[in-house]
């Protein structure tokens, strides 16, 4: 990303509601930049239950969570949204000209006229595993996400977990790491069957190791990991490693959003039901993170909120333009934007 990225709308959160907001905003020619703490779009749908069936999306008697994300990504493709993953928005300020300046935890800056918070229940943050003495290694040898694959090249990598993240990175890092060892507390996985089969095939070819067990301790000094102690059914043994990736799930926290001067209601953001604007003009909240009387935490509710938010966002970004409501089924101009005319 450039030193300062500029856009019409910054969307904090790339879950289903944030993604659909790109579609609604795109119909009104508003450019979007999404920032998410996870390493991929989809929010908790993609990270926590990608294979979970969802039954209340209109038009789909049943659709998998990951399939819903994939279809939303396909739907917003004509609008070319920009994404910044593996980042948390750590700072937000309103500039003299009325625009907002957002800063990530890595120091990147994005400026926009409108901010939309679509962060679900808050930002997802990795759970620290119950491994004694892990803190001194964090950031040097222990990482909770992969921001750059090259940081793991030629290292002995130990991955702990049994979900999609653990299996995905086992497969993705195996070609570039000196060695990869996967540890999970049981031989059954929560990951995609295809990924599990590929992992077992690589184990059969002796291109990686898999152990059933739990990491009980770490060895090393000055933040540099040398080995991890694994307790399995046959006792304890050491696994040589210079990088550890524990995937123990995520917790949801409101994070820095709580410090942005927004009025909060039980750790949620109150909004009006006309525009879904917060107590700060120009900042909107849609999806599970907002609150209003009668609020239902449903994806379809968030879709509705995104549509109404868009009307108000357009008036802020283009105050001189008249906002004309059109139907995609009959508007040739909207169909042209979608590439279907």
Image (cartoon, grey):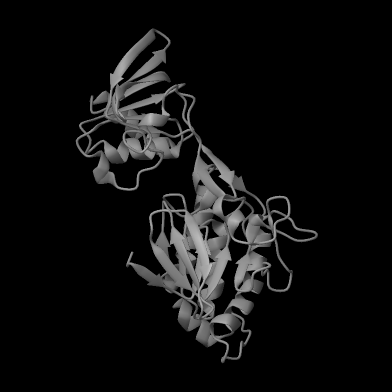
The residue depicted at 42 percent of the width and 23 percent of the height is: 133
Q: Reply above or below: 119 against 219.
A: below
Q: Reply above or below: 203 against 253.
A: above
Q: Is residue 299 visible?
A: no
Q: Position of residue 322 (x, y in %)?
A: 60, 91
Q: Outermost residue, top direction?
A: 234
Residue placed most toward the observer, 74 or 247: 247
Residue placed most toward the observer, 324 or 151: 151
Q: Outermost residue, front direction?
A: 96
Residue placed most toward the observer, 229 or 187: 229
Would you say 296 lies left or right of 205 here?
right
The residue depicted at 52 percent of the width and 64 percent of the height is: 92
The residue depicted at 55 percent of the width and 58 percent of the height is: 16
Q: Reply above or below: 133 against 39.
A: above
**Which image quadrant: the N terminus?**
bottom left
Q: Position of residue 69 (x, y in %)?
A: 51, 55
Q: Is residue 126 visible?
A: yes
Would you say 170 lies left or right of 311 here?
left
The residue depicted at 40 percent of the width and 35 percent of the height is: 166
Would you say 181 lies left or right of 232 here?
left
């Amino acid at each position: 990303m450039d030193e300062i990225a500029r856009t019409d709308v910054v969307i904090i959160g790339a879950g289903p509601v944030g993604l659909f907001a790109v579609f609604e905003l795109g119909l009104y020619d508003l450019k979007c930049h999404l920032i998410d703490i996870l390493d991929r779009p989809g929010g908790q749908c993609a990270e926590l239950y990608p294979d979970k069936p969802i039954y209340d999306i209109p038009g789909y008697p049943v659709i998998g969570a990951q399939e819903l994300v994939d279809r939303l990504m396909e739907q917003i493709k004509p609008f070319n949204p920009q994404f910044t993953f593996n980042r948390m928005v750590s700072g937000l300020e309103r500039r003299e000209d009325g625009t907002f300046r957002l800063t990530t935890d890595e120091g990147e800056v994005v400026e926009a006229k409108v901010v939309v918070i679509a962060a679900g229940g808050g930002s997802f943050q990795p759970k620290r595993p119950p491994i004694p003495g892990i803190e001194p290694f964090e950031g040097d040898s222990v990482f909770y996400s992969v921001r750059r694959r090259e940081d793991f090249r030629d290292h002995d990598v130990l991955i702990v977990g049994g979900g999609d993240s653990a299996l995905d990175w086992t497969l993705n890092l195996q070609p570039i790491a000196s060695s990869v060892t996967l540890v999970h507390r049981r031989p059954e996985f929560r990951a995609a069957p295809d990924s599990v089969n590929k992992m077992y095939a690589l184990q059969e070819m002796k291109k990686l190791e898999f152990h059933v067990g739990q990491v009980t301790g770490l060895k090393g000094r000055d933040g540099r990991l040398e080995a991890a102690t694994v307790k399995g059914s046959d006792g304890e043994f050491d696994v040589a490693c210079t990088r550890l990736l524990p995937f123990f799930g995520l917790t949801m926290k409101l994070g820095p959003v709580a410090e942005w001067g927004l009025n909060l209601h039980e750790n949620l953001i109150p909004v009006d039901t006309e525009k879904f604007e917060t107590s700060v003009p120009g900042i909107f909240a849609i999806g599970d993170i907002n609150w209003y009387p009668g609020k239902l935490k449903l994806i379809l509710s968030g879709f509705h909120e995104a549509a109404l938010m868009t009307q108000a966002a357009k008036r802020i970004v283009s105050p001189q333009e008249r906002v004309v409501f059109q139907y995609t089924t009959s508007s040739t101009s909207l169909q042209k934007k979608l590439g279907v005319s």
